[in-house]
Image (cartoon, grey):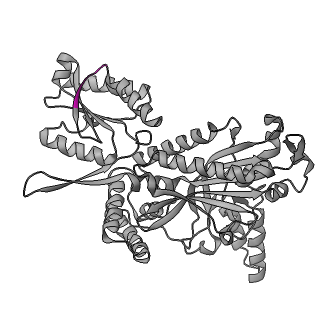
Amino acid sequence: MLSYCVRRFLTRREPTLQSSQCGVALALQHIRRRFSTAGATKEYYDQARTLLQLCTDRYYISPGQTHTDSFQRGMSCSYGPLGMELRENLLDQWWLSVTRSSAQVFGTSTLNCSKDRAVRGDGQLKVVDMESLNRVLDLKELSKDQLIQQVQLLLQSSASLRTSFLQGALEQYVPSLELVNRKLPFGLAETGLCFQPSDGSGCPGEITQTSLVWFCSPRTSSQWLDHWAQQRLQWWRKFALGPSDFSSSDIPEDELAAGASRGVRILYGFPWGQEPLETLLSRGHTELVQAHRGVRNKLQCRDGQKAVVPHVVSVTGNMDRGVKAYLYNSLQQLKREESKQKLLQRKVLKLHPVLAPVKVALDMGGGANMELRRVCEGLLQEFLEDRISAWPGYLETMPTSTSMELLNAKYDEMGVLFTVVISKNTLESGLLQVRSRDTTIMQTMHISEIKNFLSRYISAADNI
């Protein structure tokens, strides 16, 4: 099975540039054009260049033009181990924020593609079986018009890829009514991949999307839109190093989706301009009625003493762009003067403790031996059992005083919260050294305290 744009079927070519340097350089050409259009300064361009190179060097996105370009466009790319963990942490927090905000939000799961999905408009995407297509193309006796007709029939009978979760949630509305005793309001939430039409590359784009479809009384739909807009803006700002970079804005009437009466966007201010992270729309009940073939009586539920067909408020987010926003927001380039002749620049990803992909790195001090290694392995296992993500730095080359500085620089760029150094002193007294990413202060702590210290630190940050 292959998803593709039929017009590009015979001319599609795979990218051949794989190196980190080539991918970054080509992505920067795209960034430079956007900066030129936005009138941004060289300082902002340098920031974008630094972040893009850091993301490929420090395991956030895979090297290569395709991945760096997708990352810059706010679409799903091939993430490295840390990028994948950051995205999953962000999705987990989104899910908790939505499902815990009200007692009446339930999760759903729909298929990526379905023959039953009612897809409207010209932007639909199809999944076509290659063998079926080849059989049609091999019919030499057909005229050009007949061949086109056969291809169109094949497309019509093929499954459609989802471009959003809205249709699936509307279809789940009636089965969910008994779950809530036919009372309003309630919502259906879902996360996963959705697909967008090709931008000319011949291949549809993938987006890690979040969706909340909220069913409410017609008389309260406007208030619920305001409620969710405020809640979503607060959520984005909660994990931000610079909260003011996140904002909200009403959508102009001429930019509203068909059938929507009001809309709000949650925006992030990138160096080249603002881009939407979430879009909230008050959609009325037209799409809900259409999804159930116009049968209104089975859609009715109780709003006090009245039976009404609910209005729909949709909240749709792009978590790939959200990952990009938090990476830009958390990057700090700190200059410090080591001597009169030497000025050093320290790059740090100050990601929120809850979002940081790696909470602690484990390393061994000088004179490392098998006993120290066993201590590191035992401590690593404790962290993993307590769901504290840890980086086994002790598996790398044993650090000297000079290489430890390089390791700290690497961990700062990775966004690691704390570095724990196990030494011979740990074997003798149980004491180890703990370095903080945010303060660079090294403190001494007993090995029995480190796990609880990390758990309390992360929990406290989550509750702020």
Q: Is residue 373 left or right of residue 101?
A: left
**Above-or-below relation of 23 to 81:** below
Q: Quadrant of residue 345?
A: bottom left
Choose between 462 and 212: the one closer to the eye.
Answer: 462
The residue under the point 72% across, 78% down is 140
The residue under the point 74% across, 68% down is 121
Magenta span contains residue 445:
yes
x, y percent for residue 21 = 31, 64
- Over which residues does the magenta segment extend? 443-448
Choose between 143 and 289: the one closer to the eye.
Answer: 289
Magenta span contains residue 373:
no
**Above-or-below relation of 22 to 101:** below
Choose between 227 and 314: the one closer to the eye.
Answer: 227
* The N terminus lies in quadrant: bottom right
Choose between 65 and 158: the one closer to the eye.
Answer: 65
Q: Is residue 193 left or right of residue 290?
A: left
Tell me if residue 384 can be seen.
Answer: yes
Instruction: Say how many tags the image has.
Output: 0
**Above-or-below relation of 188 to 118:** above
x, y percent for residue 437 = 29, 41
Q: Is residue 309 left or right of residue 449?
A: right
Which residue is the extreme one toward the left? 340
The residue under the point 66% across, 59% down is 163
**Above-or-below relation of 237 to 5:** above
Tell me if residue 211 can be seen.
Answer: no
Q: Quadrant of residue 286?
A: bottom right
Magenta span main SS: strand
x, y percent for residue 185 = 76, 42
x, y percent for residue 393 = 27, 37
